[in-house]
Image: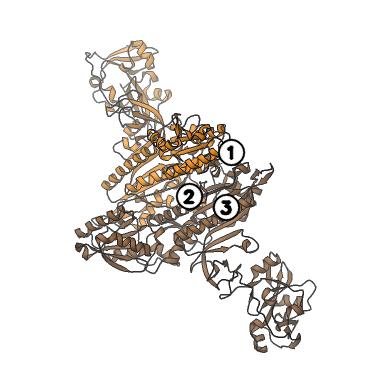
Chain colours: A orange, B brown
Amino acid sequence: MKQSRMLIPTQKQDPTGAEALSHRMLLRAGYIQQVSAGTYAYLPLAYRVLEKIERIIKRAMDASGACEMLVPEIIPAQFWQDSGRYDTYGDELFKLKNRHDTEFILGPTHEETFTELIKSSVKSYKKLPLNLYQIQSKFRDEDRSRYGLLRSREFLMLDSYSFSANEADLDQIYKEMRGAFESIFNQIGLSYRGIIGDSGSMGGSDSMEFSAPAAVGEDTIVYSNDSEYAANLEMATNMFVPQKSHAEAQPLELVDTPDVKTIDQVTEFFAIHPDQVVKSLLYLADEQPVIVLTRGDQVANEAKLKHVLGADTLELATPAQVAELLDVQPGAVGPFDLPAETKVIADEYVQPMVNAIVGANQTGKHYQGFNPTRDLPDLEYADVRTVKEGDISPDGSGELQFTKGIEIGHIFKLGTRYSKVLGADILDENGRQQPIIMGCYGIGVSRLLSAVAEQQADENGLVWPTAIAPFDVHVIPTNVKKEEQAELATQITTSLEEAGFEVLVDDRKERAGVKFADSDLIGVPIRVTIGKKADEGIVEVKIRKTGETVETKVDDLQNTIKILAKEI
Amino acid sequence: MKQSRMLIPTQKQDPTGAEALSHRMLLRAGYIQQVSAGTYAYLPLAYRVLEKIERIIKRAMDASGACEMLVPEIIPAQFWQDSGRYDTYGDELFKLKNRHDTEFILGPTHEETFTELIKSSVKSYKKLPLNLYQIQSKFRDEDRSRYGLLRSREFLMLDSYSFSANEADLDQIYKEMRGAFESIFNQIGLSYRGIIGDSGSMGGSDSMEFSAPAAVGEDTIVYSNDSEYAANLEMATNMFVPQKSHAEAQPLELVDTPDVKTIDQVTEFFAIHPDQVVKSLLYLADEQPVIVLTRGDQVANEAKLKHVLGADTLELATPAQVAELLDVQPGAVGPFDLPAETKVIADEYVQPMVNAIVGANQTGKHYQGFNPTRDLPDLEYADVRTVKEGDISPDGSGELQFTKGIEIGHIFKLGTRYSKVLGADILDENGRQQPIIMGCYGIGVSRLLSAVAEQQADENGLVWPTAIAPFDVHVIPTNVKKEEQAELATQITTSLEEAGFEVLVDDRKERAGVKFADSDLIGVPIRVTIGKKADEGIVEVKIRKTGETVETKVDDLQNTIKILAKEI
């Protein structure tokens, strides 16, 4: 492909307003162009990358038994009113009317549409299971779009919906989809983590998020440096390894601790480590008081607490609320002498503590010699701590590390959430009417471009993994006015194309410096430079990723490229 | 692919409300499903056909040097306000606002978007020509959607836009696009005609429409049965073949013709053929009187008249207007003794007439012995007739035939229509600012499904041309409960797939009759039936299009299919 026939508007300078590396480089390298705030045109280079990504996705989905189709992007508002999402989805929903005043939305996702289609065409368990997918533009009226393709108002997404008559089939498809998604991300050459989702961590494997570590990511991901374990910080846990103490239990003793409120003050006052202190905090869970105990070196995790308590809302009590409910100052809260309605919950790590310090629930006083199992035998324990970097992975393999991540995919067991409200029933094997059991599976296709760029671009431009690079080889005659260079460029391009390589040839009458800078921006894995030694039949091969260069005879070029391509 | 894993909701009966053959059969065969009035889901079978069509289109477009990309489907209303189309496009434009009250439209076409992109990224003739295309959902808020995919509110379209610095480059790309489109329609296996567009017939080749003959088509197409000539009825012309008469010219003589008004009455009165009569009609062109003369066996064409006269409006004068302007009854209008402001224009075929009858422009009188070149030497002639079936094609090859047609593609030289109003200029070779010269090229992708179905379906269902069939072979074990049949089906499917065929295997536990009916509906070109002779290793091969069947040994199956596939 001749570079002169493609629209590649490269820019020398960083565009204003683009913060993220991927956004800057996709703009500068002429891959994308903004059309309106939060919407972008995918120029020819980006489209080639998208097509390769889509091909990888389709092959993996088809291999898993899923079937591709396509539903309209405008959805009757009625579908979403029936499912209850029309009102709850919020301002991110694009709404419109047709000339006859019928209300529509622009689909951000299509659970309702697929459910309605299946509802009217599948009446028996015999026609199930089915897994149907599409790759298509989706719409979300973001309040603040940003980072280019990472948070845009119109984006390309794979969405797949499975329909089955029983849980076992859902489990099977869910497993297949997990495998397919992992295969897709691996083939693309993306570093990613499969993260246990919100509901997943609380009893099941109902949901899994795939996240690509990247500086601009919006989530904090916790992962093991020696296993597959990964979770969002809110959900992450570490292994509970009770340290056994051989110290003899001391008696529980009230100590005057005037002005000692924080953990730091406690450790200083008692000359101990924070892991010998029990921290007590008063929360209001659905407006009911709850005292939460954690080890002094650990932090309570409010997401976990909400789950454990089954609470919809959870807030730390204000000093005024502490005073009102417990009649003490916040620093003196403790699990003793509490009003009847006050619940106490302790993190697992509190249980094995021996001779700890703990608030006495009396202003200016702490207990020492606190032995939880002895002093509060009915205490309820749960995992309510926030993990820290360096904690042991819950599977016992490796230590936990933190990173920022971009959500690139999600698989989700929907169950009967949509089939029930929309009335998508089938007759089961016993002739009984049952709601269909569903799953949904999504990949942010256009977002993957940004995720790969975030992980692999450098300050000179984009660096594409071979599998999704817009071209395999970038052929650059440094001076096309020199006939031998132009001829050699044509000859090399033709022979490489005949050998199955996709070649971009820079046939422009630009200076060599401009061509090299553009080539670095564009980020094709291998560059072949035709320069001064062209008349000797020698060209230079450069690896974009490593910067490594070798000179090679034109006759050896294909072999050299094949060998180098394997190394990339 | 196992039929049980695909969503193919076939229907035994014609669905209500679907009139067109293609609409009925696409619904009945489980290819499409309505989501809302005028929007359809493309179910897995339809999607496979669409994908094959898209592949053919992309290959042809790429080969012509065009580059694929993708622009957002939501377009800032401002773009269309700037181009002037926001108000003129009418109610077919879907309009919406985002949460910040910015106005958008859903793109029915993207001239403005592409022009804006080029405007901001291309500043010099050196970066041109470019031809950029996309295949994408488009939206048109039809007043009355109908015929399924033929007139729907959301549809898939290829749209390509070319940008060049001079007319020569536009001409070249226009020619390439015409070639690419012809190649695409030929590959698909569609019967079509390239039709000279409105502006085209009037001095140039600025536009060409591609039309697929079909009963439900909305246009009347005129074509030669022996050449490439085709045009819409409004634009069609026939060859001007002046018949030479050797009769001696008679003197012009006024004849009393009481109550003789129509051509029929004239021919009866004078005992002559209509081609010996000159018909005179009074029109008002932009409110100016014009008398139009045609041969008595021909009909004036108002579209042509408007062009010839350069008029915006054209209406046949009412009897009252005739009386007022000419002071005669309508049947007596003639090109004599006219008020000064009355123009006369005659069709070419009037010129060679000898001794004709013509209205005298006096109530109750005609002239006989009318010899136009002698009696009205200053008469203006032009092609203002409507062609008839059987007329000679204007290129002299074959006779004209009429048919109804579906518009499937359009190529158009836009010139500077958009670049001027949107300010998309470049510096030309002489450093002068010039608006970019544009062309646009479109194919109705989803519409092609219907066009092919209209041309090739029968009352048993769809019949796909090999190039775009969802599968190559449909394997049908008549009874999957019989182990030898199920095994043979698997064996045949595997070996055909290994040989590169795409195979749909009907693994359902349905009766043979149901399977055959569904197979006819689905319309895969070749069916392999595994029946009673399975244990002898004999299967039946059937051609969907012809109904022809042959029995073959399983060992010979591939060869048989290859031979038959060539014949289809």
Same chain for labels 1 and 3? Say yes or no: no
In this view, the residue in front, A308 or B496, is: B496
Which amino acid lies under the numbered mark 2 shown in the image of this protein? Ile
Residue at mark 3: chain = B
Could you tell me if residue B307 is visible in this image?
yes
Tell me which corner region of the image, top left, top right, bottom left or bottom right, holds residue B233: bottom right
Q: Which mark is residue A103?
A: none
User: What's the CA distance linking mark 1 and mark 3?
Assistant: 26 Å
Chain on which label 2 sits: A
Label 2 SS = strand
Q: Distance between the Cα atoms at labels 3 and 2?
A: 39 Å
Q: Residue at x 61, y 42 (%)?
A: B126
1 vs 3, front mark: 1
Residue highlighted by disc 1: A481
- What type is the residue that disc 3 sits on? Ile
The CA distance from mark 1 to mark 2 is: 55 Å
What residue lies at 52% left-to-right and 49% top-to-bottom?
B65
Label 1: element kind:
loop
**Residue tagged 2:** A105
The location of residue A147, given as percent across then percent down, is: 50, 35
Whether residue B315 sits left or right of residue A81 in the image: it is right
**Residue at image mark 3:** B173
Crowding at dot 2, Cα within 10 Å, few <14 / some 14-19 / many 20+, comes out as: many
